[in-house]
């Protein structure tokens, strides 16, 4: 039998209200927030995150919501 550790990691002390209740882990990777859940997020979860990041692209892919980094402007 394989044991799978269930890790809940939340790197979000100042953004607690920005994430849906179903969020199990929140990571910050290369300027993007990646939010994962054990079940699929729905449109209302996506709206919660978009409400906290109105100037960023936010996408939903099943059990993952990604807040993409801001685009860099070329000089």
Image (tube, rainbow, N blue to C red):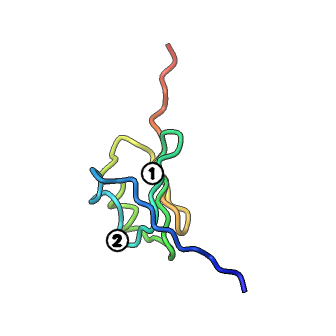
Q: Is residue 68 left or right of residue 16?
A: right
How many marks on residues?
A: 2
Mark 1: secondary structure = strand
The spot of residue 40 in percent (x, y) is: 51, 73
- Dots 2, 1 in contact, CB < 8 A: no
Residue 58 is tagged as 1
Residue topped by disc 2: 21
In the image, 24 versus 60, the foreground residue is 24
Residue beneath the point at 51% across and 75% down: 38
Q: Quadrant of the N terminus?
A: bottom right
Residue beneath the point at 29% across and 58% down: 16
In the image, 46 versus 17, the foreground residue is 17
Q: Residue furthest top?
A: 75
Residue beneath the point at 53% across and 39% down: 30
Residue 45 is tagged as none
Mark 2: secondary structure = loop
Disc 2 packing (10 Å; few <14; some 14–19; many ≥20): few
Residue 28, above or below 72: below
The spot of residue 75 in percent (x, y) is: 49, 13
The spot of residue 22 in percent (x, y) is: 40, 72
The spot of residue 23 in percent (x, y) is: 42, 67
Residue beneath the point at 51% across and 68% down: 7
CA separation in Å, label 2 and label 1: 17 Å
């Amino acid at each position: 039998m394989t044991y799978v550790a269930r890790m809940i990691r939340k790197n979000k002390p100042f953004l607690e209200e920005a994430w849906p209740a179903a969020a199990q882990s929140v990571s910050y990777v290369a300027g993007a927030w990646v939010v994962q859940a054990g079940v699929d997020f729905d449109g209302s979860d996506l709206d919660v995150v978009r409400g906290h990041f109105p100037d960023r692209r936010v996408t939903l892919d099943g059990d993952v919501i990604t807040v993409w980094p801001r685009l860099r402007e070329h000089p």
